[in-house]
Amino acid sequence: MRKSSYKFIWEDTLLEMLPSRALFLPETKELLICDIHLGKAEYFQQNGIPLTNNSDKNNFARIKKIVKKYIPEKLIILGDLFHSKYSIDKTLQKKVEGLPELLKTNVELVLGNHDAGCDIKNIKIFDIKKTKHITYSHEPLVSADKKTLNICGHYHPKINLKNNGDKLSFRCFAMDTNKNTLYLPAFGDLTGGYPCQKSFKKWAIISEKEILEI
């Protein structure tokens, strides 16, 4: 069944999966996104691959749109805010450092593997962040605690759906119920994806306004 969002409760915390590729926690007013990969087009251009620079502009616009709608107290980015330290020019750095003021909210970054060496002001940076029964990370963590949910990025989950011989690929939220790990879809427009394991529970993002539980 298609919905405008999907909600579920982990322990006593409500989480809402959004077709905007974000996760919202109403109680703490935290909005989570991951894998934006800002500067990716410039990085490829430096390596001789011609790509347009529109992706970063679109990413900033989409961030502003969902923050305006949900008015979070924190925007938490679960890693890979940037694609590489070599693709951060002064203009991009200024835009990122101006996000808290532009969005009128706190911005935090849980470091991802692509963020190595990136030096950014005005944004709180963590290796791992814990709150109640939830742990935020970029890459999935190994934990024996069955009451703790690990919310992470890195995986860029997607799912392939077939219809009358046609195969379509969609970004998705993916839940590894065996390891209590929820993977968020990559937020960046210029990011690829990796097919989910069959055992994962999945919610496919089929449009900017609709999400479908698989």
Image (tube, rainbow, N blue to C red):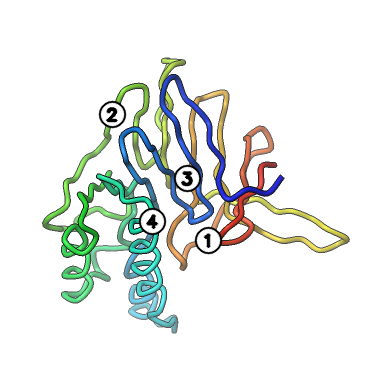
Residue wearing tag 2: 130
Amino acid type of the residue that numbered disc 1 sits on in the rendered structure: Gly
Separation of disc 4 and disc 3 at Cα? 19 Å
Q: Closer to the camera: disc 4 or disc 1?
A: 4
Q: Closer to the camera: disc 2 or disc 4?
A: 4
Percent x, y for residue 174?
Answer: 56, 40
Amino acid type of the residue that numbered disc 4 sits on in the rendered structure: Lys
Q: Which mark is residue 205?
A: none
**Mark 2 surroundings: few (<14), some (14-19) or many (≥20) residues within 10 A:** few
Name the residue rendered at 36%, 72% in the picture: 56
Residue wearing tag 3: 184
Q: Secondary structure at mark 3?
A: loop
Amino acid type of the residue that numbered disc 2 sits on in the rendered structure: Lys
Please determine whether, in this image, residue 68 is positioned above or below residue 132.
Answer: below
Which of the 4 image quarters holds residue 135?
A: top left
Separation of disc 2 and disc 1 at Cα? 28 Å
Separation of disc 4 and disc 1 at Cα? 26 Å
Please determine whether, in this image, residue 120 is positioned above or below residue 44.
Answer: above
Q: Which image quadrant: the C terminus?
A: top right
Please determine whether, in this image, residue 65 is positioned above or below residue 55.
Answer: above
Q: Secondary structure at mark 1?
A: loop
Of mark 4 and mark 3, the one earlier in the sequence is 4
Percent x, y for residue 73?
Answer: 25, 45
Asked if labels 4 and 2 touch by Cβ distance under 8 angstroms, the answer is no
Name the residue rendered at 55%, 61% in the picture: 208
Q: Which mark is residue 69?
A: 4
Name the residue rendered at 62%, 41% in the picture: 202
Separation of disc 3 and disc 1 at Cα? 13 Å
Of mark 2 and mark 1, the one earlier in the sequence is 2
Pick whichever, 120 or 33, lies toward us: 33
Residue wearing tag 1: 192
